[in-house]
Amino acid sequence: MDVAALAARLKALAADLPLPALDTADQCLEAAQAELKEASRESNAEIGLRKLGAARERLDSARVRLTEAAAAIDDYLDGIGAGAAAAPTAAAPKANAVQPPQVDPRRWWTDRVNELCDRTGAADPQQVPPTRLFNELLKAAGDGNAEAYCKRLRDAGPRTGVKLPGLAWPLVRTLAAEHLGRTPTARDVPGLRDQCADKVRSLVPKAEPDHIGAALASACTLGRKGTDDENDAARTAAMGPALVAALHRLSKSERRA
């Protein structure tokens, strides 16, 4: 083994020495010891104070030994010319390594909502309660205002947007039951999907029939999953108020008939 490889292995070994973990453990033991001391004032029984004290002594001894081992490794690395002075050269390749970009949740939400609604535009971040957002989306959906629907959803951001299904699904289930005259089941999902698809897609054009069916299945069968991608929070949120509006329109049409 050459000197560089040996130095790299020794540095990795030194970095893995669990000194921080021992410090954390000692803090936990110290806190436990303080609580036991308080409890012992009201009890004559041996409740482990001596054993806890002995454990802290052993922990302290282990910490000293680890510190000595780390110092010995540093001394050896200095002796072979691979100590702290040489470290920057060895670490240079890591500094040049390509790091994966951090995902900005709001940016992702904006792009995804624009894609689903087949529109463009930057978000104007708004902090609104989920119920207010839900009502605003229902109004836009009822008016057939796809532009306003997209804007409200886009501006809300992921933190509020992901709460929409929790507000939408009970209404979807209630309206579906009103339309069917009974509690909806999985067998009813294809028919409901076909009746709602045009209205939903007028607001969320990139919502495919399978996605609409999966959302209906989740709402009407009390959480049983359909074939939709469960990780697409933006799509699930976008379809909730649109489905409520579509089912509400079905119920109104039936009452008029």
Image: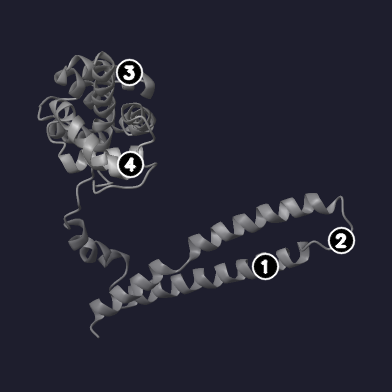
> Which residue matches tag 4?
218
Answer few, some or many: residues within 10 Å of disc 4's Cα (few below 14, many 20 plus, some between 14 and 19).
many
Q: Earlier in the sequence, mark 2 or mark 4?
A: 2
Percent x, y of residue 37: 78, 53
Nearer the viewer's eye, disc 1 or disc 4?
Answer: 4
Percent x, y of residue 250: 24, 23
**SS at badge 4:** helix
Answer few, some or many: residues within 10 Å of disc 2's Cα (few below 14, many 20 plus, some between 14 and 19).
few
**SS at badge 1:** helix
Q: Is residue 180 left or right of residue 40?
A: left
> Which residue matches tag 3?
135
Answer few, some or many: residues within 10 Å of disc 3's Cα (few below 14, many 20 plus, some between 14 and 19).
few
Residue farthest to the bottom?
1
Give the Cα separation between the discs numbered 2 and 4: 57 Å
Q: Earlier in the sequence, mark 1 or mark 4?
A: 1
> Which residue matches tag 1?
55
Quadrant position of residue 158: top left
Tag count: 4
> Which residue matches tag 2?
45
Give the Cα separation between the discs numbered 1 and 4: 53 Å
Q: Name the residue type under label 2.
A: Ala
Q: What's the residue at 17%, 32% (across, down)? A: 197
Give the Cα separation between the discs numbered 1 and 2: 19 Å
Percent x, y of residue 244: 29, 26
Q: Name the residue type under label 3.
A: Asn
Q: Earlier in the sequence, mark 3 or mark 4?
A: 3
